Image (spheres, rainbow, N blue to C red):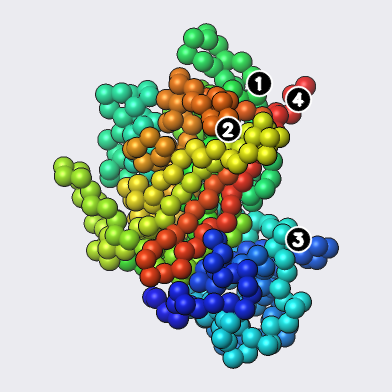
Amino acid sequence: MIDATHDPARRSWVESANGHSEFPIQNLPLAVFSPLGGAARGGVAIGDAIFDLAAALEADLFSGQARDAAEAGAGPVLNPLLELGAGPRTALRARVSELLDAGGADRANVLPGMLHKAAECALHLPVSIGAYSDFFAGIHHATAGGRINRPENPLMLNYKYVPVAYHSRASSVRPSGHHLLRPNGQRKRPDEAAPTFGPTRNLDYEVELGVWIGPGNELGEPIRIANAARHIAGFCLLNDWSARDIQNWEAAPLGPFLGKSFCTFVSPWIITPEALEPFRAAQPPRPDGDPAPLQHLWDAADQESGAFDLEFEAFLLTAAMRDAGTAPHRLSRAGGDVLYWTVAQMVAHHTSNGCNLQSGDLFGTGTLSGTEPGTAGCLLESTFGGRDAFKLQNGETRRYLEDGDEVIFRAHGHRAGFASIGFGECRGRVVPAPGYE
Ligand code: CA
């Protein structure tokens, strides 16, 4: 629902929030942070500052459902808040917006100690992640990737019936800002008779929308697609780091394993469904000739507003660019309309066999790639499996990532009549593989 918290005219007395490209008062994303020397606790982004939920709670600034949410969100992980669902989360948003509103009646109750400079805080993983499933819903990515090995038949028969996914590794998810250790593994090029063990030669990233699950479901009780939105608590940027050579060699017949499980990065801010409300969009209609989704994956309301009108960008900052002080090179820009399946369809499919989701579970949507040049969300696509090198603006070339390369994702929502919001960055620098004695 669009309400007063989305009013583009609302300004904050936290001056840096007004016109902020990521965190104006209309966004109010959640994270777990620690101020210098302080314990980890929940907070809300407002411009260049973080509003401290624990401190505000102590000063008794909340009541009713907003208080329930602030209590659940004040600790070192946000699972209890995600578990509460939309009612308390929406009440918390309304109350925080009111407290930070330049015209708010009780802004004077927000004391200086309740705001921290974000640049002086550490941001952590916002939840304890029980399980992480990675989907494959970016249809142009699936097609372009499939074309490399199966030019005649890039999409498998199941693709338009099943929101294809695999179980990935929850324990190796890290927040933006960590280093990415180049993984070792078994690699075999087509021209090699046998594999060798060593650092991956084909390190790649994948631009994805991450989804945080809120209230879970009991084992054996599927989430109906019409109810799926109640189980989605927020969104983030997700980098599904991928070692293509390890992945290619190991994947038959059971799918991705060590080529993916070494690490996944997420942006630390949980962008709530409420913040994204202005950027909802109709799911693009399926092309003529495509099968309709089976009944358990079909919901008319979800088709009307289950997609997101967001812009996703990936950038590369090489060691040479960093030394020269130049801006990062933009690798890609794509919209959210490239997903063949909605997030609600993913939730319904994931639980359709009775599988239980839990609050804090993470989904990746699959790589967000368009069809035009400059829209590929990974290097596998833009270099056709590493065949074609491409040139960066400073003259360097790349097929896959090199040590020292930094990959940066950003996402924004823009819509006429609303304040633009951003996800904050998802950033990571590749460092050399450890020795393996
Ligand atoms: Ca992926």
Percent coordinates x, y for residue 13 in the rendering: 62, 78
Q: Earlier in the sequence, mark 4 or mark 1?
A: 1
Q: Where does label 3 land, which residue?
A: 120
Specify the amino acid type for callout 1.
Gly
Q: CA distance from mark 3 to mark 1?
A: 38 Å
User: Vertically, is 387 above or below 210?
Assistant: above
Q: Where does label 2 land, which residue?
A: 258
Mark whose residue sits in front, 4 or 2? 4
SS at badge 4: loop
SS at badge 3: helix
Label drawn at residue 435: 4
Number of other residues with Cα within 10 Å of mark 2, as a class: few under 14, some 14 to 19, many 20 or more: many
Q: Earlier in the sequence, mark 4 or mark 2?
A: 2
| Quarter of the figure with the N terminus | bottom left
As drawn, the residue found furthest toward the bottom would be 105
Q: CA distance from mark 4 to mark 2?
A: 17 Å
